[in-house]
Amino acid sequence: MKYISTRGRAPALTFEEAMLTGLARDGGLYVPEAVPQFSREDIAALAGLRYEEVAFRVTRPFVDDSFTDADLRDAIEKAYSGFGHDARAPLVQLGPNHFLLELFHGPTLAFKDFAMQLIGQLFQQAMKRRGQRITIVGATSGDTGSAAIEAFRGLNNVDVFILFPHGRVSEVQRRQMTTPDEPNVHALALHGDFDDCQAAVKDMFNDFAFRDEVGLTAVNSINWARVLAQVVYYFTAATALGAPHRSVDFTVPTGNFGDIFAGRIAKAMGLPIGKLVVATNRNDILHRTLVTGEHRKEGVQPTISPSMDIQVSSNFERALFDAYGRDGSAVAQLMDELKGQGGFPVSQGALQALRETYASGRASEEETAATIRAMHARTGETLCPHTAVGVKVAEENIDPARPMITLATAHPAKFPDAVEAATGQRPGLPKRMSALYDRPERVTEVDNDLGRIEHLIRETRAK
Ligand SMILES: *Cc1c(COP(=O)(O)O)cnc(C)c1O
């Protein structure tokens, strides 16, 4: 199994190479050359299995000979052993034909744990085999950084440095990054905003001497291995509700398009999915694109669902690659237009192809808060603001013929202020996490100065 770039001008790689590389050298994203097919019998056989067994069967053909069966199974077992629910991704019913897929039982209470925990294990195995050390550097507005620190803490052969904007992440998010005491993880509070953090990381990757010296690697959401790990829960949810004998729809609170694109892969493998509904907050570039055919950036507006506040949705490039008949040069040209002119019109044929797979909707701030309040009153279920965006859009798209499954992307306690404002009740952390407020914090404040940040990384990583 080979992976090719969405821009058509980078070498094809194995699974392990694509995982360790992240972004392709031509600026594109890696996708499988061909998607493995599951028969109806293959899918029917998944019903009722442990999450870990489904994860093994679904990821096995994509991983190919990069990892042995035993190593892949070992990585999967370790990845999910710290989750606070035996089902890993349990389903809860919200109303007639509407189900919530709870993806927040991992160690940092957001769905990003599903992918990050697994790639932490796979990175460690690959580095051990290669006898190498790597340094992972990332910028975060909250969820990705905490998931990365939690996944890589204490692993051999890997150092992790996460830059977050000083004073601008929630207390839960900050403590999740600053309380792990393993010497290989480092939370850096940068004097600046999230854009400064991202720019600093980008500059480090462009400093090739530094990049090679420390073995710099990224685990952001464009990494193919992260998308793959997320394909699994589409299978567990759909088979629990009757697939392959009946089809299901999904609604996904969307930012960078990684989570929903995993659903597209599940569908391409043969899982009977009717609609994949893109749910956006008022940063609605993806909804506007599907409605108008014009993909155009506007300024980012802060919302109560901050993990979906995006302007450039990086994994959407993978959807465009499919919609343009896998024409890498066409995609490269669109991405140039997006960068140079702030947007591009989607061709008629490509728009039609996108609409065959994806539907969409948006929720305003008021609608999001109203949905949290209404669901709390009608079902007793407390939604995080991202999930509430999904539930609102899902309700507008329910087809009585098929179950609708909305992905619950974070635990409400991760965003307590927005939830309390909507319901009048402050959501508490799960019991297993209550020590978060007692443990000492360890954080290094840094100025927005590339030379000094690089010096700090050189000096503090293990040699
Ligand atoms: C990252 C995130 C999202 C958006 O997911 P994408 O894969 O970027 O589309 C939605 N909700 C929460 C809570 C997140 O952390």
Image (tube, rainbow, N blue to C red):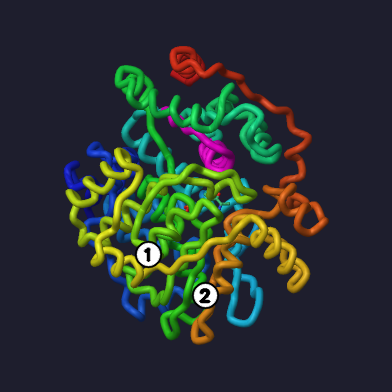
Is residue 137 shown in magenta? yes
Question: Mark 1: is the Cβ under 8 angstroms from ligand 1?
Answer: no
x, y percent for residue 224:
35, 49
Left or right: residue 28 compared with residue 369: left
Residue 53 seen from this side = no
**1 and 2 marks in contact (CB < 8 Å):** no
- Give me the residue at 41% from left, 60% from top: 262
x, y percent for residue 198:
46, 31
x, y percent for residue 413:
71, 50
Q: Quadrant of the C terminus?
A: top left
Work out whether residue 351 or residue 50 is closer to the camera in this orientation and state it. Answer: 351
Q: Is mark 2 on a helix, strand or loop?
A: loop
Work out whether residue 30 or residue 77 is closer to the camera in this orientation and state it. Answer: 30
Left or right: residue 31 compared with residue 232: left
Residue of label 1: 264
Is residue 6 shown in magenta? no
Left or right: residue 253 compared with residue 122: right
Tell me the amino acid under the disc marked 1. Answer: Arg
- Give me the residue at 35% from left, 80% from top: 40
Residue 397 numbered mark, or none: 2
User: Is 198 drawn above or below residue 457 in the view shown?
Assistant: below
Q: Quadrant of the N terminus?
A: bottom left
For the record, the magenta segment spans 135-152
Tell me the amino acid under the disc marked 2. Answer: Asn
Dot 2: within a 10 Å radius of its alpha carbon, few (fewer than 14), some, or many (20 or more) residues?
A: some
Work out whether residue 362 or residue 167 is closer to the camera in this orientation and state it. Answer: 362
- Give me the residue at 60% from left, 68% from top: 100
